[in-house]
Image (spheres, rainbow, N blue to C red):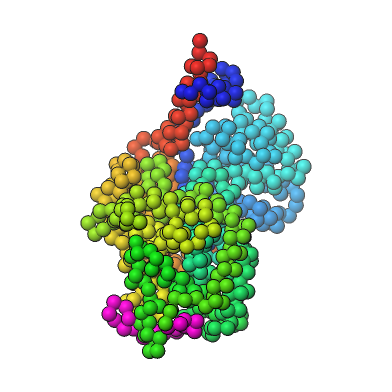
């Protein structure tokens, strides 16, 4: 090993004991059980439901409480304790209302602090003390450690502990301590979170999900098609930008654009008021809990049409300048007979309903009006200058990738594009042919380039981000076409169908999944593919675990809009040292419901895979890194200290 490098390292480890301590520490960590991984996907702006799953660790918190207290506490007490761990601030407040006097409250504090300490001690048993320390509320570390590491062997310290707890209570610190301990517990039950794509769109609060992820202790993200749409907009793609605004209008979420990210929609509204009127195909979907006035609804309906038409126009020049995308079929505006209000698709003529083509010049249907162009310029400027959006998009880039190999598994939002025979689909980009992993790496390369060059708006990289949203061979989309236009304007439902890549039925076969794992240099005997993207219809008996357990699809529909199709409210996956468990969540109503009624019988667990032997850190990605560190430290030891 390079002597300069080792000299530099010796500045940090400036005595033999320091190196030895670190080596012993790392060796010990390698032998601990592997930490729990938590997989979620397709969150689609459903912040509240996501919060609940995070706070209860997909049922993990309750499981730990039951392990400890099943024989001691009643079911109701267990539920109440679990609720306290999920929502400590609110639950404490509710409990306080129940007590008649100070003494009762103090008794409750004493009991709860002891239970919390027990729970933390149990939940942290597979971590080092140093890792636990980092997870403790910083202002109480010393006190909690005293309480955690008390032994009953010599009872003469007992009054000392009792005194500590009493002091905390009488100094008015109990609430803060309990709240801190609750968050520590939430953190301990999940070591690492994977978000397998689609944080954005449809639901109302994607920004709050982003803030949560930014503050989360350990997370990675596999981009979904909806996430790259937002990345694309920020990277300068006007067609991506038109899409995100269209989807926000459709789901009555324009406040995400205006209020959350501070983007001025006034110019777009002015344009919309000038050219559009009411139109049933463009009325926003209503949130069940929100009231929209007639006037607001009309405004949104107009904006929705204005931005949808801009989107359709913007698609054309990209399709024309990128023959590699093979999307000529989607030059729809050119297939319209504007006099008869009809369109011809694959030789069949369809009547157009609810059309709104006031800004379209039949001679040059993809030409933007000057006003439309100005609106888009202004919107793009404001998107690229939104400080909050910049923060969220930078994080999405930093923690995100198109796919991820992690602890032997392959995480990917959509698919690996295949042909009917199960071969990796080929795509030609600028005279070079790509397939399989190589194709995905190439996509990612373009996306990163586009993001790094937001000033370039019509280059191949920026167009490629839009391709990732909607292209046939996009691993995030994986359908032959996106029939947005048809769903707005054509009645015949046959035209709405989006033909899926063969992957989506071939992935039922074990040999196909094995082949894909091998394509990514993963061991097919041990690895799994984990997908989101396509809602698993439990309602129709679809099984999320496919291909003899090699394939797990966890999109169960956090998205409220899709819950009637799936029959559940989302899947999550837990992978701990004993194996993998799939958790099916029933519908999440509200935090209030959990707090008041303790309705937390949300999750049904199903075993996917059981480890024959308990998995240790040394067999994981983290273990690999530790082994590398150890090898460096051993070199340092030899170079510097062993005589
Ligand atoms: O139901 P909506 O919101 O109109 O969206 C439908 C569109 O969303 C898509 O399903 C893509 O979104 P998902 O990644 O969530 O599946 C398209 O295939 C489809 O055209
Ligand atoms: Mn998706």
Is 148 left or right of 330, judged from the image as shown? right
Q: Position of residue 287 (x, y in %)?
A: 54, 72
Q: Between residues 287 and 72, which one lies in front from this camera angle?
A: 287
Find the magenta span and give its range. Answer: 344-362
User: Of all residues shown, which one is farthest toward the left?
Assistant: 421
| Residue occupying the point 56% across, 25% down | 8
User: Of all residues shown, which one is farthest toward the top?
Assistant: 643
Q: Position of residue 448 (x, y in %)?
A: 47, 51
Indicate whether 273 appears above or below 473: below
Q: Position of residue 540 (x, y in %)?
A: 33, 66
Indicate whether 156 appears above or below 410: above
**Numbered-mark total:** 0
Is 447 left or right of 416, judged from the image as shown? right
Q: Position of residue 427 (x, y in %)?
A: 32, 57
Indicate whether 320 appears above or below 351: above
Q: Between residues 102 and 50, which one lies in front from this camera angle?
A: 50
Classified by dominant secondary structure, the portion drawn in magenta counts as: loop
């Amino acid at each position: 090993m390079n002597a300069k490098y080792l000299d530099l390292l010796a500045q940090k480890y400036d005595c033999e004991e320091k190196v030895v301590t670190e080596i012993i520490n790392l060796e010990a960590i390698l032998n601990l059980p592997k930490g729990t991984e938590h997989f979620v996907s397709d969150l689609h702006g459903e912040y509240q439901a996501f919060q609940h799953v995070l706070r209860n660790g997909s049922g993990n918190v309750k499981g730990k409480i039951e392990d400890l207290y099943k024989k001691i506490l009643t079911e109701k007490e267990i539920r109440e304790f679990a609720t306290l761990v999920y929502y400590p601030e609110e639950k404490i407040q509710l409990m306080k209302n129940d007590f008649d006097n100070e003494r009762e409250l103090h008794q409750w504090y004493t009991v709860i602090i002891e239970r919390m300490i027990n729970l933390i001690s149990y939940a942290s048993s597979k971590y080092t003390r140093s890792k636990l320390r980092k997870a403790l509320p910083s202002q109480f570390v010393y006190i909690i450690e005293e309480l955690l590491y008390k032994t009953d062997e010599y009872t003469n310290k007992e009054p000392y502990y009792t005194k500590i707890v009493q002091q905390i209570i009488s100094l008015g610190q109990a609430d803060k301590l309990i709240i801190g301990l609750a968050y520590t517990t939430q953190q301990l039950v999940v070591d690492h979170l994977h978000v397998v794509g689609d944080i954005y769109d449809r639901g109302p609060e994607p920004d709050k999900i982003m803030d949560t992820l930014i503050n989360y202790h350990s997370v990675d993200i596999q981009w979904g098609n909806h996430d790259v749409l937002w990345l694309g907009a920020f990277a300068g793609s006007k067609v991506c930008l038109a899409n995100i605004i269209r989807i926000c209008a459709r789901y009555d979420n324009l406040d995400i654009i205006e209020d959350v990210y501070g983007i001025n929609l006034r110019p777009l509204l002015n344009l919309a008021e000038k050219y559009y009127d009411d139109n049933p195909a463009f009325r926003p979907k209503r949130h069940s809990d929100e009231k929209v006035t007639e006037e607001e609804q009309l405004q949104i309906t107009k904006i929705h049409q204005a931005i949808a038409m801009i989107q359709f126009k913007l698609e054309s020049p990209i399709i024309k300048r990128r023959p590699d995308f093979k999307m000529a079929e989607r030059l729809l505006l050119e297939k319209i007979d504007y006099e008869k209000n009809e369109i011809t698709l694959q030789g069949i003529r369809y009547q157009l309903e609810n059309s709104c083509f006031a800004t379209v010049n039949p001679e040059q249907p993809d030409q933007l009006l000057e006003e439309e162009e100005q609106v888009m310029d202004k919107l793009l400027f404001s998107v690229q200058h939104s400080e909050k959006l910049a923060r969220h998009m930078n994080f999405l880039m930093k923690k995100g990738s198109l796919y991820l190999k992690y602890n032997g598994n392959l995480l990917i939002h959509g698919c690996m594009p295949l042909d009917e025979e199960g071969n990796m689909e080929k795509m030609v980009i600028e005279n070079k042919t790509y397939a399989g992993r190589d194709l995905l790496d190439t996509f990612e390369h373009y996306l990163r380039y586009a993001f790094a060059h937001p000033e370039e708006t019509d280059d191949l990289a920026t167009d490629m981000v839009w391709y990732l949203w909607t292209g046939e061979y996009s691993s995030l989309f994986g359908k032959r076409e996106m029939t947005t236009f048809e769903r707005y304007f054509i009645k015949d439902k046959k035209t709405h169908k989006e033909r899926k890549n063969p992957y989506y039925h071939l992935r039922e076969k074990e040999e196909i999944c094995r082949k894909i794992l091998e394509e990514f240099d993963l061991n097919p005997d041990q690895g799994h593919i984990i997908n989101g993207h396509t809602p698993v219809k439990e309602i129709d008996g679809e099984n999320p675990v496919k291909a003899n357990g090699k394939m797990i699809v966890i999109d169960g529909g956090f998205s409220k809009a899709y819950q009637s199709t799936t029959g559940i409210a989302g899947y999550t996956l837990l992978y701990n040292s004993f194996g993998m468990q799939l958790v099916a969540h029933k519908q999440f109503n509200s935090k209030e419901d959990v707090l008041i009624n303790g309705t937390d019988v949300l999750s049904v667990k199903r075993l996917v895979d059981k480890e024959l032997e308990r998995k240790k850190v040394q067999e994981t990605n983290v273990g690999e890194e530790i082994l590398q560190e150890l090898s460096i430290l051993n070199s340092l030891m030899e170079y510097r200290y062993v005589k």
